[in-house]
Amino acid sequence: MSKTLKTYSKLSTEYYDLENHINHDIALAFYIDYAKQANGLILEPMCGSGRFLIPMLQLGLQAFGFDASHYMIDAFKQNYSKISMQAPVWQSFIEDFNDNKLYKLIFIPYGSWGLIIDQVIAKQSCKIIYNHLAVGGKFVLEIETVSSVPKNCGILHKNKLKRADGSSISLTTIPTYDAQTQIFKCECRYESIINQNIVDTEFEEFKQYLYKFDEFDQILYAAGFTNIKKFQSFQKEPATDINARILIYECIKL
Ligand SMILES: C[S@@+](CC[C@H](N)C(=O)[O-])C[C@H]1O[C@@H](n2cnc3c(N)ncnc32)[C@H](O)[C@@H]1O
């Protein structure tokens, strides 16, 4: 039986695509800067529906992406269809990724890396990234830390987003955090609402591994990286605050 992702199914993907993501413009400018300087092939593993990759493609950059969720890949193709029918994206799990290209930039924004909750797979995936980088190429990624746990854990949240046709998708969720396993978890219920009737429901158990301040450094070194910069903001402030909520790594393959 082929492997399928348990998250980012139909409604979850649609909801994600409709959401306004915090700091999107700042993050996009940050990654576009790297992409413009890459001078070669660019890859975004876990690319989702394309909010980073599509603007890069619009700039004429040679960028590619993949994602484990075929719903996300379909949403990407739909979003990209106004530009071209040939979207340079495909479905793959990061831990299974293998192609014969070498990339000058591989980037993974927005804490997606934490969705790899098994740390053995995280180490293998980091090595796979290293092997697909050209010498001099950069791996830039953002991770969320144990300090990013929201204060409102255990409390039920509800939100509703409107589609262009006036119908909506609601999300009901209860976030929890286990400090032992470093896993942030959300039990999510998505409902598609048309003319005030619930026409579809989807359940999702969202899990994210949150890293301690120095934990990811070891994974990068084990993969072969020796030239590593670590920032605590998109303004590239060096990471010195052990309570930083996000960490952004810039790693060069020597
Ligand atoms: C939070 S979304 C971010 C998407 C995109 N980077 C963005 O910022 O809009 C995380 C994405 O990772 C994908 N994903 C989760 N686990 C994966 C895995 N093991 N391999 C590849 N993609 C994965 C999900 O399908 C989802 O599209």
Image (cartoon, helix red, strand yellow):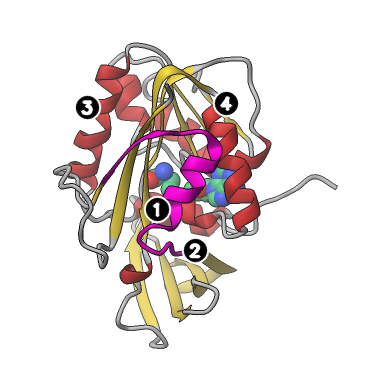
Q: Is residue 103 left or right of residue 9?
A: left
Disc 3 crowd rating (10 Å Cα; few below 14, some 14-19, many 20+) is few
The kind of residue tagged 3 is Asp
Gap between marks 2 and 3 measured at Cα:
27 Å
Number of on-image labels: 4
Of the pair 152 and 223, the residue shown nearer to us: 223
Q: Secondary structure at mark 3?
A: helix
Q: Secondary structure at mark 1?
A: loop
Residue that numbered label 3 is attached to = 33
The kind of residue tagged 2 is Gln
Mark nearer the N terminus (4 vs 2): 4
Mark nearer the N terminus (1 vs 2): 1
Disc 4 crowd rating (10 Å Cα; few below 14, some 14-19, many 20+) is some
Tell which residue pokes out farthest to the right in this image: 1
Q: Could you say where residue 159 lies in the image, as x and y percent from the top left?
A: 34, 72
Mark nearer the N terminus (3 vs 1): 3
Mark nearer the N terminus (3 vs 4): 3
Instruction: Write down the quadrant of residue 7 in the picture.
Output: bottom right
From this viewpoint, is residue 71 visible? no
Q: Secondary structure at mark 2?
A: strand
Residue that numbered label 1 is attached to = 111
Q: Is residue 37 left or right of residue 180?
A: left
Q: Could you say where residue 63 lies in the image, as x and y percent from the top left?
A: 42, 21
Mark nearer the N terminus (1 vs 4): 1
Residue that numbered label 2 is attached to = 208
> Bounds of the magenta span?
208-230
Task: Please give the label number shown on residue 131.
Answer: 4
Q: Are marks 1 and 2 in contact (CB under 8 Å)?
A: yes
